[in-house]
């Protein structure tokens, strides 16, 4: 497994990380046994970065990962955990809470569910508009001093927020959506992370399945994509058409569309680590095949031509959620 360092002060992690969100109902029902087997297969393949959130399945995801890690040495895995998203008993979204006391409470519960003594990278899932980022980062810094957390990360925040956070404590990575058809970080954010020597863990590299080359079924109960603009009506058909163009270009490289999309992200810089949301071992194996690709500059350009930056129809989140993304603020 190829390794990459997260930022100037962060840990060495596998070039591809495993995003576990889909194992806890966010894309509809999942198979528990297959999820556990996929986590084990990822670890056996050399993947050491596992990303989760305390709100994925209301703690289910953390408990699932904790179960998978019971037979593993703690130093075999780098656990990245998001916190702050608030949910009600019906799984509805209530907003975000990143007050210092809430940060420490959330960490305590995550440690218990994961069955570990420390979290490698702890990050607010979104910027809490009611809490200065300096206060949130300061609270995590106190958790680091106490030994409960090793590093601080950020998620979906803009350039100004990144600078403010980094002024309080070293930030090892920014987790943010980045794919062939979601390239907003190239405008300003990527320049700032590189100037501050902060890594990027990229999620949504397959655009939640749109450019994976596999059939997209969003009819299952609990699949949040059913509310995503890119998966609605004519938008969905237009976006799926992009996959066929990408498939043709990927074929010239002897890659599947998914492998080409992952390889493209890998080629955009050694400071970027794509998170693969595989729920099954066959999808994981396919994703790992992207590591064999060494895209040349002209091949990168060709893939970008096949799936242009602004070709996707619809925003990446519904309007209300887009409004919560500090990373989308053009004055950030």
Image (cartoon, rainbow, N blue to C red):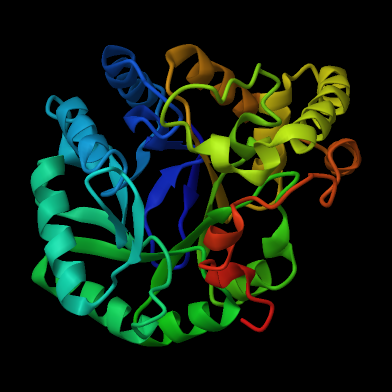
Which residue is located at x 10 percent, y 41 percent?
Answer: 115
**Where 1 sits versus 148, above or below?**
above
The answer to which of 231 and 62 lies nearer the viewer is 231
**Where 67 sits versus 200, above or below?**
above
Which residue is located at x 49 percent, y 38 percent?
Answer: 224
The answer to which of 315 and 176 lies nearer the viewer is 315
Which residue is located at x 41 percent, y 35 percent?
Answer: 26
Q: Position of residue 1 (x, y in %)?
A: 47, 31
The answer to whether residue 148 is seen in the rendering is: no
Q: Position of residue 22 (x, y in %)?
A: 41, 31
The answer to which of 97 and 160 lies nearer the viewer is 97
The answer to which of 101 and 232 lies nearer the viewer is 232
The answer to whether residue 159 is seen in the rendering is: yes
Q: Quadrant of residue 61?
A: top left
Which residue is located at x 21 percent, y 42 percent?
Answer: 59
75 displayed left or right of 235: left
260 displayed left or right of 94: right
Q: Position of residue 86 (x, y in %)?
A: 29, 58
Q: Position of residue 242 (x, y in %)?
A: 83, 31
**Where 31 sits versus 298, above or below?**
above
The quadrant in which the C terminus is found is bottom right
282 displayed left or right of 183: left
| Image label count | 0
């Amino acid at each position: 497994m190829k390794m990459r360092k997260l930022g100037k002060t962060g840990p060495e992690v596998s070039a591809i990380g495993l995003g576990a969100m889909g194992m806890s109902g966010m894309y509809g029902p999942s198979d528990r046994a297959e999820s556990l087997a996929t986590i084990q297969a990822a670890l056996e393949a050399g993947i050491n970065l596992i990303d989760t959130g305390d709100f994925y399945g209301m703690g289910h995801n953390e408990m699932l990962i904790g179960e998978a890690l019971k037979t593993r040495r703690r130093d075999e895995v780098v656990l990245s955990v998001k916190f702050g998203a608030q949910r009600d008993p019906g799984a509805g979204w209530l907003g975000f809470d990143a007050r210092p006391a809430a940060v420490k409470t959330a960490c305590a519960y995550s440690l218990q569910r994961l069955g570990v003594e420390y979290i490698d990278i702890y990050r607010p899932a979104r910027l809490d508009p009611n809490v200065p980022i300096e206060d949130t980062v300061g609270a995590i810094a106190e958790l680091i001093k106490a030994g409960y957390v090793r590093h601080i990360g950020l998620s979906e925040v803009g350039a100004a927020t990144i600078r403010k956070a980094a002024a309080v404590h070293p930030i090892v990575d920014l987790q943010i959506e980045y794919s062939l058809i979601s390239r907003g970080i190239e405008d300003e954010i990527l320049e700032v992370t590189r100037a501050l020597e902060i890594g990027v863990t990229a999620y949504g590299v397959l655009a939640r399945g749109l450019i994976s080359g596999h059939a997209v079924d969003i009819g299952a109960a609990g699949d949040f994509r059913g509310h995503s603009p890119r998966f609605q009506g004519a938008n969905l058909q237009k976006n799926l058409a992009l996959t066929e163009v990408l498939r043709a270009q990927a074929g010239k490289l002897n890659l599947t569309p998914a492998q080409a999309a992952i390889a493209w992200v890998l080629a955009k810089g050694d400071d970027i680590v794509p998170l693969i949301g595989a729920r099954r071992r066959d999808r994981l194996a396919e994703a790992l095949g992207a590591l064999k690709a060494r895209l040349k500059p002209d091949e990168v350009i060709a893939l970008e031509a096949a799936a242009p930056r602004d070709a996707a129809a619809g925003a990446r989140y519904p309007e209300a959620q887009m409004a919560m993304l500090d990373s989308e603020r053009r004055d950030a």
